[in-house]
Structures are given as structure tokens and as C-alpha cells.
Amino acid sequence: MTKPKTTRFDTLTLHAGARPDPATGARATPIYQSASFVFRDSDHAAALFNMERAGHVYSRISNPTCAVLEERISALEDGVGAIAVASGQAALHLAIVTLMGAGSHIVASRSLYGGSHNLLDFTLPRFGIETTFVDPRDLDAWRGAIRPSTRLLFGETLGNPGLEVLDIPRVAELAHVHGLPLLVDSTFTTPYLMRPFELGADLVVHSATKFLSGHGVVIGGLVVDGGRFDWHGAGGSAAKFPTLTEPYAGFHDMVFAEESTTAAFLLRARREGIRDFGACMAPMTAFQILQGIETLPLRMQRHIDNTRKIVAFLAAHAMVESVGYPELSQHPDHALAKQMLPLGCGAVFSFSIRGTREQGRRFIESLRIFSHLANVGDAKSLVIHPASTTHFRVSAEDLRAAGITEGTIRLSVGLEDPEDLIEDLSRALHAAGKA
Amino acid sequence: MHCAVSGNSVYAYTGARRFDAALPTLVFVHGAANDHSVWLLQARYFAHHGRNVFAVDLPGHGRSGGEPPVSVEAAAAWLMMLIDTLHVPRVGLVGHSLGALIVLEAAARHPQRATQLALLGPAVPMPVADVLLDAARTNDHLAYELITGWSFSARDQLGGNPLPGVWMLGNAMRLMERSRPGVLYTDLLACHRYGGGLSAAGSVRCPALLLLGERDLMAPAKNAAALIAALADRRVVTVPDCGHSLMTEAPDAVVDALRDFLPVAT
């Protein structure tokens, strides 16, 4: 017997989780636009409801099109499974509420997407979940912020917008020493650039709205379980996660960590979080994200190639004060990025132009190809001013700490001809200089 | 639930149901470097359909203490000690792969105790490839990769799990990775060295079900032919397009076959 062939990444982006439709032979994944699914008989119905049989009941809980997407992202991340949800925000919320309730605490990187920051800093405290924000580069700060009530460490693979590279192996090791899981938001990197589970992370969330779908046409999120964390507590953590290790009255006293050794988190998230909070993904959305993932390797490589050219152009421009991209030697995480992101550091980065806020405004409004909007990871190039938009609720102190100034401009580099993009930026910088 | 056998803690999944002495009892036994959770759907189904269920973690596996049994015979002896501890006079025995050999041996040794015997992915003999044994002996991750590669049919290597949202290959790999160093090698060696399968089959007195995966590469269906011939009262069900991981690849087909073989109160 020879070693079985393992399916490679690029092939998995096209095939994982899918097979020709058994009913029709359709090769593309069908959009199962159905709220519910017919039971074979009464026993089958009861068995599906009680998780004694595999299958779909109601599309809030699971749906065949969404299930293909869930398997595909799991295969690409080398996880055990996933849940597709309504948005990246819903993914983060689902991960958190599956693990903890009032009285719990999170330690999070302070360099987060503004929406994540809002959830952690303003909204969850109302429900009794507190967060301490730390400098993602400061391991002592992570360590010092952990309390007896801490249930989760959370950061982004690449911080937003400063592109702080999260040192996943070291933060994960710290988390595990304390019997805690590490959740990372891998939206900016996608599994093409980094597979966080291989580096020690336990859970991954994506805003699939971004590079995974890749065309700026849907809102969706994914929660992926790496399947390695021992919720039952080889390290004494059983009491930390009663949602997974104690009987749940809301599902016939199911003890999720007994039911599934590897996927207890996912079971609870599906049997409670999606069921009760209801932020499910629509099958049409799942289909569009699947279409995007089919070209993920091709698109990500082009995103990276274009980004490198634009970074080089901006870094040499007289109107540009600084460029924050980890592949540049002056970036604080340059060495770490070379180690953890050898294929590239993504296609979203920030730079600062010299001059006033008015000059910044003139720059953005002079762009013709870059679209001024709040999103990243589109096939089209995008631009935004974080201090007045995505991060406008963040205090001035926290903005400084996150490396955001009045002059900071964030680009999401698309798939256009790089020369056209450079010409667009050049024209806008010239206009800003004259303002 | 936990109990103790020979001074070691034993875990068995019961579907969160209390034992009812009035109901028949099923014992599920997993395969190499696995644990009770491979029976996720099947054990839960029968626990909620008129059976007491004990889906055990073998010694040294999952949540059970002790060392993994070094032979199929030793595992069968342990299994009967467990059943004695549970004070269950007669049981239906269900096993997968290594677990199939264990329940076969147990049913042969104690024909008066076994009411039915269900063997999933069995082969007699069950030789293990040298490359796999060598990798397992050195706790090389290659062993898990080989098993994962051989345990799912070519179709299922790309997914399509009937259980929504779970990536079968990743889940199988992660479960084996959780086993303690040396456990997989001990288990595989027990399979490899077990020479009493046909003799045991001849001693079985209860009805037997053999559930075979049509595309099984770990224990090819043709390798069960002698076993089938040696069992006096047997039924054979072959699951189309299915590999060795029957409970995962075809959970409904497994439940249906077991339900037909083990009539349940609904």
C-alpha cells in the first residue's frame, strides 16, 4: 500500500464539501433556497430534532448550500468544522456567547476592526462580559490582563488598520498555559496566506464579506473550530466552560464535550447560538461566497502582487509620510511577518500623507479608480479614512495606540491593472499637494 | 458516566439517559485511537429508542484511565469485566474495526451473554501495513495521515458530510491526534496479531450483522469473506460508495441497518 494522496489547497478551494447534486447532476453547488426540509416519517423527524440522525431541519439551523461552504472553509483552514452566519460580526458574537456568559472576561488586542471593538467595548459589557484591550505585540500585557474570569483571548491575524502581526504561537501558548482558547479573526489573511490552527489558534472567525467572497456583493461570516482545545480540561479548565462541559437543559441535558470530543464548540454553537440568536446565513449568500472561494488562490496572489507594487510606489513618494506594511523593513513586525506570512501580508494597509486633514480629504476625493467606501477585500480597489469612519467611536488615546492618525488612509488593493492604480494614486497625491 | 474496572476509571457515553433495567442494553466499542464519539449519532439514536447504551472509551483511550489492551483477547476480557461491573446480564455488542474484533471475541467467549453482534468494518485476519505500523511505532504523524487517507472513500475525501458543517477528514485526524503516544501502535498491533477471529466466529451463538463499506481500503470487504462464512447466523449489509469510517460517512445507513437488526421500541 502506498501513501494515500492528499488533496491540495487549490483543489480544495474548488471541491471541498461539494459533490455533483445527486438529484439533478448539477455540477455547481445548488442554492437550496428552502426554509425547511421534508421528514421521511415521524421517527425521522424526532431523530433529526434530537441529533440522532444527520440532516437538515430548518435553514436557520443548517442548510445544504451553507453546509458545503462550512466544510470548504474547514478543509482550507484544517479545522474540524464551521458554522456559516449572517456576518463577520455575527461570527464573533456567536463564538463569544457559545463560550461564556455574564461575569466572564476577554483579553483582546486593541488593534481590531472598529465593529469588533464596538461589540467588545460598548455592547457586551451591558450583558456582563468585559474586555481588557492590550497591545498585541506585548506578551506581558496579554499575560497581565488574564483574570480568573477570563474565558478567551482574541486578536486579528493582521491588526486593523496598523497590520500588527499577531504572534499566534506565543499568544496561543500563553492562552493554553492558562487553560484558555485563542480566537483569531483571519479575515485579512484568509487561509491562503495563513492557517492559524497550524500556529496554535483554537478558533477562527472570518468576515466572508471580504476576500473569501471577494467581490463585495454579500455580507457573511464564518466560525471555524480547530478541534484541538480540550474543553473538558486536561489542563484543569473544565469549570471554565460549563456551556460545553455541563448538561444543557435547553437540549435534553446534552453535555456537548461528551457528545463530541473534537467538535463540542460547534455543537453548542449550532444547537444553541444559531438556534436562539438566529443570525444564520442565507443559502444564496453561501453560494456567492463559494463562487469567490473557487478563485481564492488566484485572486489572493494578484491582490498581493498589486499591493507590493503600490506599497513600493507610496513608500518612495514625497507626499507620503509613512507606509504601514509588514513587508517593509521599518515595520515593527517585519521579522515576524517573514516567518508567519511568507506568501504575503495581505492587500489592506494604511499610509499617512503629509499635510492637513483637508489635504487628506482632497486626496480621497481625487481618486477615480479607488472607491471611497467602508469595506475591504473587494476585487475593486477601495479607500477610506479610518479616523472619521470605521474607527470614529474609538477614543483619541486608543486611536493613537492603534497607530491611527488624522492623516491615516487605508487602502484595500484590488485586482485592477497595477499601473492604473498607481496612476490614480499619483494623480490624487498631486491634487492633495496642491490643496 | 464513569465507573471503575480493575481500579481504573472507565468512561461510557449513555446519551444522557439513566440506566433502566427493564430495557435491553447495547455496548458500542470504537476502533484504533478513537473514542466513544465516533458513535455520535448511532449511540444517541438507540439511547433514545428503547435501549440502554454504553458507548465505551477503551482503557487508555478518550476519558478512560489505564493502559490500552495489548491484544484483542485482553480487550474482550476487559469488556466483559465492564459489563459485569454494570450488572447487565445480557447485551447486544456493536464494534467498529478493532472494536469489531473485540466484540467478536467477547461474544465467542461468553455466548450466553451476547444477544446480538454487530461488526462494522471487520476483517479476519486484520493485517496492518508495515508502513502504518512503523509510523505508529514511532508516533509519527504519518500514521494518522495514512489512516485518514485510507479510511474514507475517494468520494468522501472531498467531504459531503451528511452531518452539516463537519469536515470528516479533519475531525477524524483531530480525534486520533488526541490519543496518547503509543496508543495507536498498541491498537494496530492488537489488530495485526489477532489470530483467533475465525475460531471465535465459530463459537458465536447469537445473530450477527456485518456492515461493510464497499470502498473500504483499511479493511476491504473481501477480507471479511472468511468471517462471514464462519458465522452461523449472520446478515451482511454492504454500504455503497462507503469507506471504513461507516458511522461518519453513512450515519443513516448504519442506523437503519442496526435498527433493522436490533428492533427498537419507538
Image (cartoon, rainbow, N blue to C red):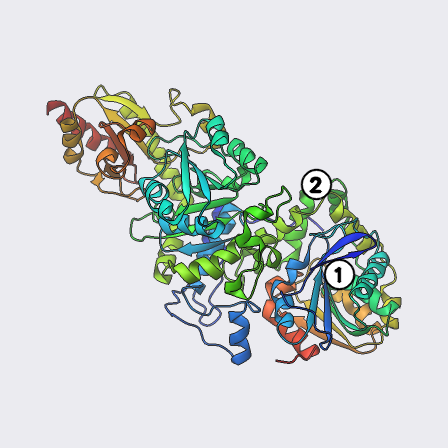
Q: Nearer the viewer, residue A180 or A48?
A: A180
Q: Disc number at residue B37?
A: none
- Amino acid type assigned to the residue bearing label 1 in the image: Gly
**Which chain does tag 1 point to?**
B
Choose top left, top right, bottom left or bottom right for residue A134.
top left
Q: Is residue B140 left or right of residue B231?
A: left
**Which chain does tag 2 point to?**
B
Expressed as whole percent of the image width and height from the top left, the position of residue B3 reads: 75, 58
Task: Tell me: residue A434, above or below residue B229.
Answer: above
Tell me the SS state at disc 1: helix
Expressed as whole percent of the image width and height from the top left, the position of residue A81 reads: 52, 53
Q: Sequence-wise, which precedes: disc 1 or disc 2? A: 1
Residue ID for mark 2: B140
Expressed as whole percent of the image width and height from the top left, the position of residue A78 reads: 53, 47
Report the residue at 87% width, 59% height from top: B195
Task: Tell me: residue B19, above or below residue A156.
Answer: below
Report the residue at 57% width, 59% height from top: A247
Q: Residue furthest left?
A: A435
- Amino acid type assigned to the residue bearing label 2 in the image: Asp
Report the residue at 32% width, 30% height from top: A398
Q: Quick one: quadrant of the C terminus of chain A?
A: top left
Choose top left, top right, bottom left or bottom right for residue B49.
bottom right
Residue A184 shows in the view: yes
Residue ID for mark 1: B99
Q: Are marks 1 and 2 on the same chain?
A: yes
